[in-house]
Image: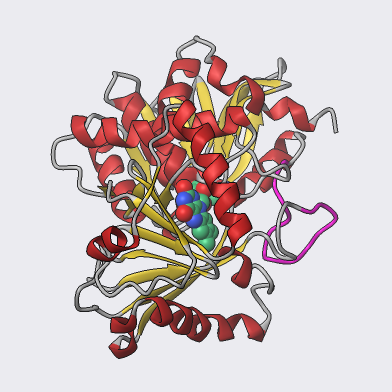
Amino acid sequence: MDSAQHETVIIGAGVIGAALAYRLSTSGTPVTVIDRATPATGASGAGFSWVNAAHKTPSDYFRLNAKGVAAHHAWRAALPGASWFHPVGNIELTRRGETTAALEARSEELATAGYPVRRMAGAEARDAVPGLQIPDGAGVFHFQDEGWVDAPAMTHDLLHRAVQAGAALRTHDPVVGIERSANGRVAAVRLRSGGTVSGAEFVIAAGNGASALLSELGAPDPLTSGDGHPGPRTGPGAPHPTVGMVVETTAVADAPRPVVHAPGISFRPAPNGGLTLTDNPTAAQWSRADPRLWDVPALLMERAARLLPQLHGAHIAQVRVGERVLPVDGLSVAGRLPGAPNAYLVVTHSGVTLAPFLAELIADEIGGAERGELAGFRPDRFERR
Ligand SMILES: Cc1cc2nc3c(=O)[nH]c(=O)nc-3n(C[C@H](O)[C@H](O)[C@H](O)COP(=O)(O)OP(=O)(O)OC[C@H]3O[C@@H](n4cnc5c(N)ncnc54)[C@H](O)[C@@H]3O)c2cc1C
């Protein structure tokens, strides 16, 4: 057995595991983070990384995400040199009268909840996004506090800060087994390399890899079946709701700074000076093995260029096919596992938005407090299904 008796063992070095490792280790808790691969190569390396809450329901999930947005602003201010969160705002164009009316109504609710949003004049939107073609009759809304994250940069920066604060990071070594004591508590995890890592608390922040670990623990799996194939359980949305595609373009002259959403296309700046494009429902039509998925990059380029003519000279620089970490009810899962009281599960979509705030909540809960913000998101809701 490893001689190091680390108190908290985090399985998974995506944005969530990294944020939690940072939060715990900088407040004095000994931490070991284990990943089967390189950090940020799961969902965290494949997403659109828009930091947002405006459209999320029900109300406790909206509030969790709104606090996620606020925590990004707070961490950006508190962490010297952290440059991965870009609070550039989000501009949303609606096409039809009824979507404009619905967004108008939602805006009023959001304003009442203290979430900044306003109608924007077309000329102002064109100032913010040079060249933007606004279809006749479109409504334009501005969500001022939203933005985007370079999620791999966030993951690596937070892990680096955690390591500097004393955390141990072990990569390329999957957890392949879990050892339990007679009272059901987890005593140690077994690594493929043959070692074991013991601890007092174990956090499963393994994204879609959580399913295998939960099966080992005999706990219900809340996740939508993976690999883009519909399984016995289904999640919300399109036929293959876990499948997502993100396209990065080559550098673009006059690249817009805000995140922009329009019917059929969303884009935001990419770290290479180009744009990152996506459209959730389009890619989620196809399983990852379906060749029709590869029609999507050209489609996204074409749709984006209709809104932003300067994209006509750009090319595709990179395409990422990702798999969402998607609980079957679409909501976050965070809490101790019934039957394994020192095992804490955290799996969620919108994990980029939520990582800093979830890290704060989970660090408090591992320390013995109970955070009411997580009351509606416990793993035991799947035991009752
Ligand atoms: C296409 C797409 C678009 C998205 N858009 C957005 C968005 O706009 N805004 C937003 O907020 N969120 C978005 N998301 C969601 C967000 O990216 C995820 O919720 C988030 O990255 C989840 O982070 P995580 O750390 O939980 O999981 P992951 O990033 O998947 O990390 C889990 C880690 O665990 C490791 N692991 C798994 N099993 C084991 C094991 N047995 N042993 C050791 N290590 C293991 C993996 O290697 C991986 O590194 C999007 C996701 C996708 C795919």
Q: Is residue 333 left or right of residue 115?
A: right
Q: Is residue 246 visible?
A: yes
Q: Please identify the dominant SS of the magenta region.
A: loop
At horizontal 33% and vertical 83% (from top left) the residue drawn is 309
Q: Is residue 11 magenta?
A: no
Q: Is residue 233 magenta?
A: yes
Residue at far bottom of view:
313
Image coordinates of residue 371 in percent, x first then y, are 52, 15
Which colouring convention does the figure follow? secondary structure
Q: Nearer the viewer, residue 224 or 164?
A: 224
Q: Nearer the viewer, residue 47 or 53?
A: 53
Number of callouts in the render? 0
Image coordinates of residue 137 in percent, x first then y, are 49, 66
Up/down of 321 relative to 381, above or below: below
Up/down of 312 relative to 69, above or below: below
At horizontal 71% and vertical 65% (from top left) the residue drawn is 240
Q: Is residue 85 left or right of residue 228?
A: left
At horizontal 64% and vertical 34% (from top left) the residue drawn is 58
Q: Nearer the viewer, residue 27 or 85?
A: 85
Image coordinates of residue 121 in percent, x first then y, are 34, 56
Picture quadrant of residue 132: bottom left
Q: Is residue 251 left or right of residue 286?
A: left
Image quarter (top left, top right, bottom left or bottom right) of the C terminus: top right
Up/down of 3 relative to 136, above or below: above
Query: Where does the magenta region start and end?
Result: 222-234
Residue at far left of view:
81
At horizontal 74% and vertical 26% (from top left) the residue drawn is 380
Image coordinates of residue 223 in percent, x first then y, are 69, 46
